[in-house]
Image: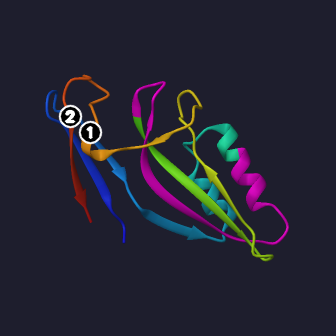
Amino acid sequence: MEKRLDFKCSSCGEEFVFLNGVEKSSKDKDAINAAIVDYSESFKNEINEAINKEGFIEAIAMFHPKFCSKCNVIVQGISVSSVYKNGKISIIESECPYCSSELKKIDYKFLKCPNCKKGLLKVKEVD
C-alpha cells in the first residue's frame, strides 16, 4: 500500500511531502534507472553495477523520508535491494543528494523544522 507522510511546521508553516514505506519492484533496468534519476551519481553507479551483475532477477525499492544532519534537510530516501538467482541480495542506501553524506532515520515525534529551526513538524499519514 502506498503511503505518504505530510509534514507541516507548527511555527513557520513550511510543508514537506514524502513517500513512506512505498515498495516498488522491477526487472526492467530502464525503469530502475528512471526511478533513481534524481539521486547522486555514486548511488546511480552502485545501482547500475548491482543490476548488471550476473544472475540479476529484480530490484525492489523502498522509500522513506530521511534526514541529513550535515545539510539539515529532510530528503526522500530510497533503499534498493537487488535479488539474484543464487539467492543473494544486495542492499544499497541512498545518500544526501546535496552533500553525499549518510542519511539518518527520522524520529517523527520530535522533528524540528529544518527551515526555521523553531517549530516541531506535525506529521499526517496519508494513504
Q: Residues within 10 Å of mark 1 (few under 14, many from 20)?
A: few
The earlier-in-sequence mark between 2 and 1 is 1
Residue with the mark numbered 2: 120
Q: Position of residue 52 (x, y in %)?
A: 79, 60
Circles 2 and 1: CB distance less than 8 Å? yes
Looking at the rendered image, the disc whose residue lies closer to the viewer, 2 or 1, is 1
Q: Would you say 14 lies left or right of 103 here?
A: left
Q: Would you say 78 lies left or right of 43 here?
A: left
Q: Position of residue 10 (x, y in %)?
A: 14, 34
Span highlighted in magenta in the image = 45-73
Q: Would you say 50 lies left or right of 98 here?
A: right
Q: Residue at x 25, y 49 (%)?
A: 6
Q: Residue at x 20, y 34 (%)?
A: 120
Q: Residue at x 53, y 35 (%)?
A: 96
Quadrant housing the N terminus: bottom left
Give the mark count. Answer: 2
Residue with the mark numbered 1: 110
Instruction: Give the amino acid type for the residue marked by disc 2 in the picture.
Output: Leu
SS label for mark 1? helix
